[in-house]
Image (cartoon, rainbow, N blue to C red):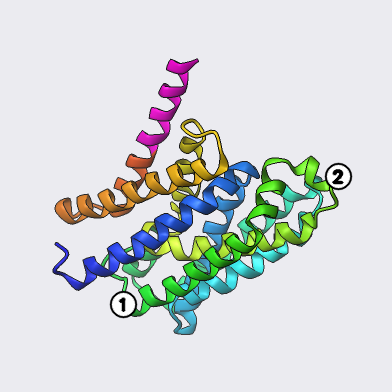
């Protein structure tokens, strides 16, 4: 299986995606941003469609749209009373633009399917290198702001009392999330990216009691889901996103059962 270059690329890309998703997912859950993750996946669809329309790599279009939108959400949604309406408006616009750009690009159905649900065979070595650069960039920034991000995510009231730069931190986190969505969509597709950015972390919180342990468990769940999903996809020729979704859902419900047994 690993003798094929496209599977080598898929496993390298999948490993990067799992690590980024596991780390970022813990903060997504802590900051109650699961809905925003879903919205960014729809914006990523519009960006990828725009990239195809312009003759770019879909990843470049995703990065452009998700980054601009995340900054917009951070500014428009500074007040919680406006956050949901802002996200809904941007999401609706993104879906419409995605459909428009695909129509104007006159792309065949396989392009749309690859954007929406991911494509293992569509990942080139150049894509892997680009994803590696983005992933390392995200990890470096997370390491630099980790202490502040953890404080603001798990104790937002205390962070405000201490005078922490919460608004700037929120925008930085949203940009990092935009990068993560763009990277991860290459495997699971824009419609299902929220799975890797929410379920492993949501399951991890039932098995760990510190932020560091939550991140470790979430990354482990993500890695297992991606690696096993790629293998099963290769064996059955079924979509990899289906297997990843099923595996992560199993992890999540297993965590709920574990919590109930302990209670």
Q: Main secondary structure of the magenta part?
A: helix
Residue at the spot x=50%, y=41% of the render? 214
Q: Is residue 205 left or right of residue 69?
A: left
Residue span colored magenta? 249-263
Image position of 254 (left or right of 96): left
Q: Crowding at label 2, few (<14), some or many (≥20) Cα neighbours within 10 Å?
A: few
Residue identifier under label 1 = 125
Q: Closer to us: mark 2 or mark 1?
A: 2
Q: Secondary structure at mark 1?
A: helix
Residue occupying the point 80% across, 41% down = 157
Relative height, residue 158 to residue 132 (above, below):
above
Is 194 rendered above or below residue 135? above
- Residue 94 visible from this viewpoint: no
Which residue, given by chain and number where applicable, does mark 2 sit on?
Answer: 161
> Where residue 132 sits in the image (x, y, percent)?
42, 71
Q: Quick check: is 120 in the magenta stretch?
A: no
Find out whether the residues at labels 2 and 1 contact each other: C-beta distance under 8 Å: no
Which quarter of the figure has residue 66?
A: bottom right
* Position of residue 120 measured from the top left corner of the image (x, y, whole percent): 28, 64
Q: How many marks?
A: 2
261 left or right, relative to 14? right
Residue 184: give x, y in percent of width and height: 44, 60
């Amino acid at each position: 299986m690993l003798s094929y270059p496209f599977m080598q690329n898929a496993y390298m890309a999948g490993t990067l995606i799992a690590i980024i998703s596991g780390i970022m997912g813990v903060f997504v859950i802590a900051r109650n941003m699961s809905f925003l993750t879903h919205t960014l996946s729809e914006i990523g669809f519009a960006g990828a469609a725009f990239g195809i329309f312009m003759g770019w790599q879909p990843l470049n279009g995703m990065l452009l749209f998700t980054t601009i939108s995340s900054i917009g959400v951070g500014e428009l949604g500074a007040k919680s009373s406006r956050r949901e309406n802002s996200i809904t408006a941007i999401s609706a616009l993104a879906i419409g633009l995605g459909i428009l750009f695909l129509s104007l690009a006159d792309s065949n159905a396989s392009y749309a399917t690859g954007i929406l649900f991911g494509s293992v065979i569509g990942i080139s070595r150049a894509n892997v290198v680009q994803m590696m650069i983005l992933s390392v960039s995200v990890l470096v920034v997370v390491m630099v702001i980790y202490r502040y991000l953890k404080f603001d995510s798990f104790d937002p009231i205390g962070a405000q009392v201490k005078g922490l730069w919460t608004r700037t931190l929120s925008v930085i986190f949203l940009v990092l999330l935009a990068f993560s969505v763009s990277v991860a969509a290459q495997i699971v597709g824009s419609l299902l990216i929220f799975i890797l950015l929410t379920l492993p972390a949501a399951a991890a919180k039932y098995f760990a009691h510190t932020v560091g342990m939550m991140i470790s468990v979430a990354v482990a769940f993500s890695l297992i889901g991606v690696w096993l999903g790629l293998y099963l996809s290769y064996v059955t020729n079924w979509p990899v996103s289906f297997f990843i979704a099923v595996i992560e859902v199993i992890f999540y419900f297993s965590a709920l059962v574990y919590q109930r047994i302990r209670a």
